[in-house]
Amino acid sequence: MPELPEVEHVKRGLEPKVTGEVITGVTFSDKVHIGKEAGKETIIKGIDLESFRERVIGSRFKSIDRRSKYLIFTLENEFGEQFIISHLGMSGAYFVVDTIDDIGIPNYINHWHVELELQSGKKLIYSDIRRFGEMRLAKHLEDAAQIMAIAPEPFEEGSEDYFIRQLKQKKWQQKKIKEAVMNHSVISGCGNIYACEGLHTAAINPHRLVKDMTEDEQRRLFKALVASLEEGIRYGGSSISSYRNVEGESGQMQTRFKIYGRQTCGTCGREVEKAVIAGRNTHYCTHCQK
């Protein structure tokens, strides 16, 4: 699943290509139509397809922002602003192309689901192999519960103290620290990959209970998580399976992992242990992480 660094690179790729463009048409794939007709929320959530089409056609992309793992497209038209809030799910990707075939990656060509026609003649395509991603329309961001529940951006001043306050809450005290840091109400944008890497950097075992950690350990962990996220951004994100940026390129962060997906620890060379925590595969070193 794309995490904060991957979504940040999608945002950076889209901004110069889409900002200022006007939406002149909207087309949905057969899979989206079939899903909606069957009563499923396939990609387009919380609104029927015709209403979505009517509300966005004629709107201009004012800005593109990222909040944790969500992309926020601010649209404006004669009636004011509205927002498309998009999550990439497990395998979602955006491309700006002349035609769908220009994407150049067969899986993404075969699994396109939303095409926004732009005034310039370009098309903004959303593809999603597994169809776990979503696009939602909101008149006000305050109405989007999934956005309002997110912790401050980890790079913002004060976010470390927010992290510590969250971990002191009773609901987290009996939880394993790995589960806590994957929750975006505790630290935003940190999913399974960067949680594993950050815990390894901080030398903290993912099975440790929050209540058994000192505040110094928690602060050390926060700094390690932020460093892992920043490194992920610096190296273009992680392409473990299907992640691609707007140019169709893979990230390179996976070549720098010290623990995630490895057979041996990148620090000490010992065998990597594996466990499932909060439903996610967890990689750690019992020698390096206590």
Image (cartoon, helix red, strand yellow):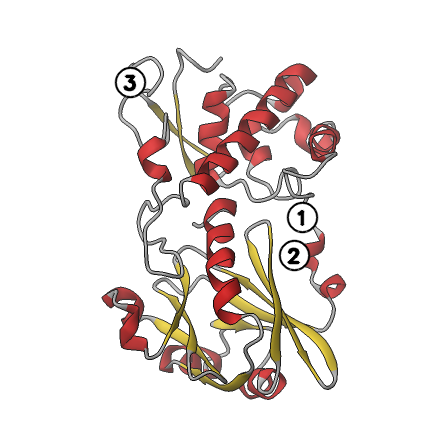
Q: Is any atom of residue 41 visible in this view?
A: no
Q: Is any atom of residue 223 visible in this view?
A: yes
Q: Which three-letter amino acid code belongs to the residue tagged 1? A: Ile
The residue located at (36%, 25%) in the rendering is: 258
Q: Which residue is mark 3?
A: 271
Q: Nearer the viewer, residue 232 or 120?
A: 120
* Image quadrant assignment for residue 282: top left
x then y, percent, for residue 24: 52, 87
Q: Which residue is mark 2?
A: 146
What element does badge 3 sit on?
loop
The residue located at (47%, 52%) in the rendering is: 9
Could you tell me how far apart the alpha carbons at marks 2 and 1 are, in whole angstroms? 7 Å
User: Taking 119 as reference, is 282 left or right?
Assistant: left
User: Taking 123 as reference, is 156 left or right?
Assistant: right
* Image quadrant assignment for residue 280: top left
Could you tell me how far apart the alpha carbons at marks 3 and 1 are, in whole angstroms? 35 Å
Q: Which residue is mark 1?
A: 150
- Mark 2 or mark 3, earlier in chain: 2
What element does badge 1 sit on?
loop
Number of disc labels: 3
For the residues bearing labels 2 and 1, Cβ distance under 8 angstroms: yes
Q: Which three-letter amino acid code belongs to the residue tagged 2? A: Gln
